[in-house]
């Protein structure tokens, strides 16, 4: 049976695998990350219209991919991660941001600070349902006020090209129990997770319409401008594999 989220992502080799393989320069994930970076930049730009100062948190920060992009766009950047191996790797990438190794998901966990902007990438889909909800609950507690934003993603939208493989992964999960990879989530489930934490999703953007198999057969370099164009078409957003949700306190 596959290890739990905590067990799998606490392994030192997972830190290297993320940097070397998952987000290698030619990987489809890197292509989509370039689009998501532009989406995050726009969120910060809009936030600057009402915030002179932005205190920022990246939860489940991994090897620092997101916080290293964000740290020079905000005034104070903090990353939280349960794996010391990933914390060490992430801290090396940061110029001014601070990484903290801790688990914030227990209900009685200390709330170390409040933030104007919080992000968490690849956590909501990978984590077991109970841990997923506990994580979003914990992040809701850390939002500074009703103008603060929580941005989280779903990189396995079932209404995308991944729907083709859904029956196969469903059977595997029935046989082997919960898996931290090969999972799916609907937009409805994302909204329900947010609502249970006292949040409301106010906006959703997406990217990743073509899919890794086709993109890599053509070459991710050629597909990149097509994916960027498609991500801007509102009618296609619900069918993109990566969904980016922007939420506020109710």
Image (cartoon, rainbow, N blue to C red):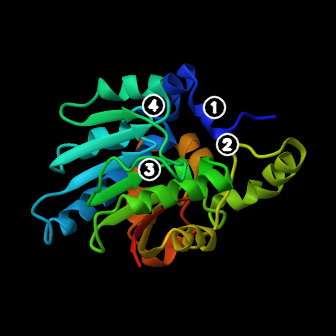
User: What secondary structure is marked by label 4?
Assistant: loop
User: What secondary structure is marked by label 1?
Assistant: helix
Of 34 and 121, the residue lying toward us: 121
Quick one: label 1 or label 4, which is nearer the N terminus? 1
Quick one: label 2 or label 1, which is nearer the N terminus? 1
Dots 2, 1 in contact, CB < 8 A = yes
Q: Residue furthest left?
A: 52
Disc number for residue 8: 1
Of 88 and 214, the residue lying toward us: 88
Disc number for residue 180: 2
Q: Residue furthest front?
A: 108
Disc number for residue 25: none
Q: Position of residue 204 (x, y in %)?
A: 44, 71
Dots 1, 4 in contact, CB < 8 A = no
- Which residue matches tag 3? 32
Mark 1 or mark 3: which is in front?
1
């Amino acid at each position: 049976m596959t290890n739990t989220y905590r067990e799998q992502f606490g392994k030192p080799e997972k830190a290297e695998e993320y940097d070397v393989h998952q987000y290698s320069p030619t990987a489809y994930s890197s292509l989509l990350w370039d689009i998501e970076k532009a989406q995050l930049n726009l969120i910060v730009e809009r936030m600057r219209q009402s915030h002179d100062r932005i205190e920022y948190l990246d939860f489940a920060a991994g090897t620092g991919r997101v916080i290293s992009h964000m740290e020079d766009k905000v005034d104070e950047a903090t990353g939280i991660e349960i794996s010391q191996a990933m914390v060490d790797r992430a801290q090396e990438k940061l110029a001014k941001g601070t990484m903290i190794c801790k688990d914030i998901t227990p209900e009685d966990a200390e709330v170390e600070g409040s933030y104007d902007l919080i992000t968490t990438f690849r956590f909501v889909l990978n984590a077991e349902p109970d841990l997923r909800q506990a994580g979003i609950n914990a992040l809701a507690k850390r939002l500074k006020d009703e103008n603060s934003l929580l941005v989280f993603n779903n990189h396995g939208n079932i209404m995308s090209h991944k729907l083709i493989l859904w029956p196969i992964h469903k059977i595997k999960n029935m046989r082997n129990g919960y898996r931290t990879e090969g999972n799916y989530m609907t937009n409805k489930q994302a909204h329900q997770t947010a609502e249970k934490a006292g949040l409301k999703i106010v906006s959703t953007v997406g990217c990743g319409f073509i899919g890794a198999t086709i993109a890599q057969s053509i070459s991710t370099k050629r597909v990149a401008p097509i994916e960027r164009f498609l991500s801007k078409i509102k009618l296609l957003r619900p069918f993109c594999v990566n969904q980016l949700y922007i939420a506020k306190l109710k």
